[in-house]
Image (cartoon, grey):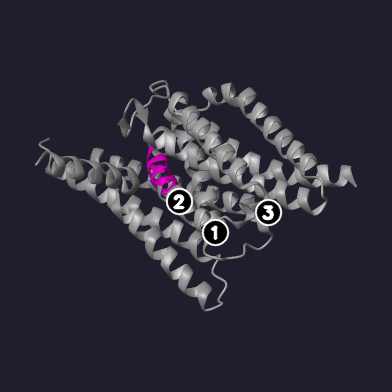
């Protein structure tokens, strides 16, 4: 059981370390890299894709945090 | 002939050294220096071992795979800092305030190390150091003056690292929220550049695309800060009326 706890704790550490508190950022980057790879293997220049995804990912991350904050304010007793 | 080899290797190495030092100084200013410098030192030791063991066979290393892995991780870290910093700057403004806390070693801490600082610094030194080693081997071996290329690459690294150390003190005057935004933008820029290169994409203008990319992300950050401020202060006004 101790070994399982150690494995779990190790996995959680690396998840928290790489993915952080917004999994959507890591997921967005992974999808963008996959699409860039697909375009490059089809000989389509794809250098422009990642910068556009960066803008979209930051926009979505900010929107998610703003909504979460707004929900928090609405549910907290005044 | 020797002067040409030295100048070419030195100038090409300066570009890579600037990228390396920008990451180390930026991360150290935000996360604290101890773990950052340990990460840089370990990265340098690994670099020396790999370089010493492989010698001129260094160019056989799969540099594109390294670029992709390191670039993807820098991009994920950079984007997290980018988004957080936009929110902080929107609230505190670009001038910051007196409550800005000094750099601390907070975060994923194990074995007494801040692993975010350690890994970012380690990766920056290892990847950029390998690129300098490639430049030295490529230009030095082509001119049959590997020793001269080595001196040029080493001189570039020492010069840029010295400048980085000399100016790191002045970073303390920059408000912490702005510093996080700047480092987030730098990590996002390098991450984008290396990850795309690792996948085989060719940037228009090569390394010259880096400042363009940084400028683009800076404009995007300014736009997001303005939008966030409008949202925050707009809803605050609505709440008071």
SS class, disc 2: helix
Closer to the observer: label 1 or label 3? 1
B45 in the magenta segment:
no
* Residue count near mark 2 (Cα–Cα under 10 Å), binned few <14, some 14–19, many ≥20: many
What x and y, as percent, mark residue B67?
Answer: 52, 54
Residue linked to disc 1:
B64
Residue most extreme to the right: B1
Q: Which residue is mark 2?
A: B75
The answer to which of B26 and B48 lies nearer the viewer is B48
* Residue B16 makes an appearance in the image: yes
Q: Is residue A46 above or below residue B89?
A: below
Chain under callout 2: B
In screen coordinates, is B66 left or right of A7? right
Say which residue appears at 54% left-offset and 54% top-offset: B194
Label 2 with label 1: CB-CB less than 8 Å: no
Quadrant housing residue B6: top right
Q: Are marks 1 and 3 in contact (CB under 8 Å)?
A: no
- State whether residue B94 appears in this view: no
Chain label for disc 1: B
Which percent across, then down, holds residue B157? 67, 35
Residue B85 lies in the magenta stretch: yes
Q: Is residue B176 left or right of residue A67?
A: right
As helix, strand or loop, the secondary structure at mark 3 comes to: helix
Sequence order check: which comes first, mark 2 or mark 3?
A: 2
Q: Are marks 1 and 3 on the same chain?
A: yes
Q: Residue B232 sits in which quadrant?
A: top left
Residue at figure coordinates x 30%, y 49% from the top left = A22
In the image, the segment drawn in magenta is B77-89
Quadrant occupied by the C terminus of chain B: top left
Of residues B14 and B58, which is closer to you in this image? B58
What is the x, y in percent for residue A62?
Answer: 34, 50
Residue B208 got which mark? 3
């Amino acid at each position: 059981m101790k070994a399982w706890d150690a494995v779990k704790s190790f996995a959680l550490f690396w998840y928290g370390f790489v993915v952080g508190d917004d999994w959507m950022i890591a997921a967005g980057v992974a999808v963008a890299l996959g699409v860039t790879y697909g375009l490059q293997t089809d000989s389509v220049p794809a250098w422009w894709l990642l910068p556009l995804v960066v803008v979209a990912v930051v926009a979505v991350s900010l929107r998610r945090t703003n909504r979460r904050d707004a929900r928090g304010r609405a549910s907290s007793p005044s | 002939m020797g002067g040409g080899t030295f100048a070419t290797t030195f100038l090409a190495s300066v570009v890579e050294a600037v990228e390396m030092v920008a990451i180390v100084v930026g991360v150290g200013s935000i996360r604290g220096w101890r773990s950052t410098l340990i990460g840089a030192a370990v990265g340098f030791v690994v670099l020396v071992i790999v370089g010493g063991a492989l010698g001129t066979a260094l160019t056989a290393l799969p540099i594109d795979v390294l670029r992709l892995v390191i670039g993807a991780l820098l991009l994920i870290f950079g984007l997290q800092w980018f988004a957080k910093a936009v929110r902080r700057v929107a609230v505190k403004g670009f001038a910051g305030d007196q409550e800005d806390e000094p750099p601390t070693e907070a975060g994923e801490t194990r074995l007494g190390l801040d692993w975010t600082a350690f890994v970012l610094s380690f990766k920056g030194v290892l990847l950029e150091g390998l690129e300098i080693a490639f430049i030295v081997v490529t230009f030095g071996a082509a001119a049959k003056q590997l020793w001269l290329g080595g001196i040029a690459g080493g001189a570039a690294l020492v010069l840029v690292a010295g400048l980085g150390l000399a100016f790191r003190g002045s970073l303390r005057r920059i408000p912490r929220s702005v510093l996080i935004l700047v480092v987030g933008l730098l990590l996002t820029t390098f991450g984008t550049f290396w990850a795309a290169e690792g996948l085989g994409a060719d940037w228009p203008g090569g390394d010259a695309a880096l400042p363009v990319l940084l400028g683009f992300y800076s404009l995007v950050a300014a736009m997001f800060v303005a939008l966030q401020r409008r949202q925050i202060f707009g809803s605050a006004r609505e709440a008071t009326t």
